[in-house]
Image (tube, helix red, strand yellow):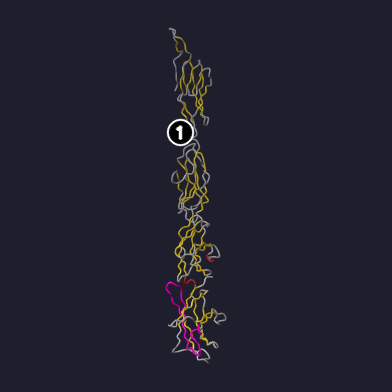
Amino acid sequence: MRSRLFVVNVLFAVALASCVNMGPDPYGEDIKAPTLTIMETTGSKESLEVTFGASLSGGITKEDCGFYLSLDETFATSEKVKATGIDKTGKFTYARMLNNYDGKWYCKAYASNGRIEITSSVTSYTVKPFSTYVSATVPDFKSGIGDEAVVEFSVTAVWGVSLSECGVCYGTDKSSLSIEHDHISAGSSTGTHTVTITGLKVGQEYFVCSYAREGENVVYSQACSFVVISAPEIKTSSPTQIESSSAVCGGYDIISKGSEITGKGVVWGTSHNPDVEKTYSKSAGSGSEPFSCTLSGLKPVTTYYVRAYAKNKVGIGYGEEITFTTLPIYVSGVELNKTSITITEGDNYTLSASVKPSDATDKSVNWSSSNTSVATVDQSGKVTAVKAGSATITVTTTDGGYTATCNVTVKKRVEDEDGGNEDYDEEVIEW
């Protein structure tokens, strides 16, 4: 325990006009009870001034008087201070270390001729509490994000008190704040200090106070409370109702992390880690309730990356990334530009197939002939007449197996009178 230094100024009045006789006076000694006063001394600590007087006879000199100091009113244990080195004004200075705050000191004067000692009545002085000399301000909560909080406080000390430590105490129980529990030291200097408290739980209310001490003497400030916050947490729900141009996705298990949820929704794109700033997003309002959104305007047979998000005043929290692929636009039918044609041996005709809908993902088709000895067809729809007869050309979609047909009649080619070829009959193409 550090001690307090008190300076005792003792003023003797060798000849007093009015002395109080404190007991038998066979030698004529008179001694006046001491008076205790407190004064501030510039540049030093608090000073204790003791003033008493004695009218001395019977061979008593100035050096044969002084006073007793004790923390015990009965003076069972005391310190005897003999007045020495008295200057011509009758004053001398006595310096000692008082080892307590908020303690009561008792004082009585004495005088002795070597055989008999007489004492005065007892006076007392109570040393001020430690908090009179040292103060610590209520911490100012600066910020609290994630598992950290920053607080600021100030410490002042007067009359030369030298601090051994100052800092903050913190915890979830206001009544248990002390240096015996969780605390962080900020050094031993007075002035303003900034302390970072770590290892905190997001969303938990904490209490914090500042402290300053000199040895075992400790002063605490009032406590304040704070809650550390962070960006919210959220989980992404699996996409459902996936179509060629839309899907449904959302979020759930939203944790606010100490701050109100001001926005939520989903973000998506064709690359990893979509966010609200750079990719598509769909808002679902605010609050911590689960939600779902319809993602529209998607491209068929395209892989998308989607994440749910939630906002609070700290920032944005994203859920895990989920991947899905949109469906194709399925074929619903096919049509040919001709349902029947008549062509001459050796000639050809190209059929045209129209797949429905026009934006179907897979428009590929396969062509076939029911009688390749009469007419053949290639995969571009080109029909070639082989010999007279009938055949059916069929087009079949790869997606869905939808079909359309065209009846082909091949007529015989004959030579004319000039040796050229003459069609057996006029080509007929039926629409």
Residue 338 is situated, as x and y percent measured from the top left of the image, at: 46, 24
Quarter holding the C terminus is top left
Residue 74 is situated, as x and y percent measured from the top left of the image, at: 56, 82
- Residue 115 occupies which quadrant of the picture? bottom right
Residue 10 is situated, as x and y percent measured from the top left of the image, at: 46, 81
Quarter holding the N terminus is bottom right
- Residue 114 occupies which quadrant of the picture? bottom right
The magenta stretch spans which residues? Answer: 37-66
Q: Residue furthest right?
A: 76
Q: Please tell me which residue lies in front, 40 or 298.
A: 40
Say if 119 sits above or below 325 in the image.
below
Instruction: State yes or no: residue 171 in magenta.
Output: no
Instruction: State yes or no: residue 48 in magenta.
Output: yes
Q: Amino acid at mark 1?
A: Asp
Q: Residue furthest bottom?
A: 26
Q: Residues within 10 Å of mark 1 (few under 14, many from 20)?
A: few
Which residue corresponds to mark 1? Answer: 359
Element assignment for label 1: loop
Say if 11 sits above or below 360 in the image.
below
Q: Please tell me which residue lies in front, 88 or 197.
A: 88
Q: Please tell me which residue lies in front, 21 or 10.
A: 10
Q: Residue furthest top?
A: 418
Q: Please tell me which residue lies in front, 310 or 32.
A: 32
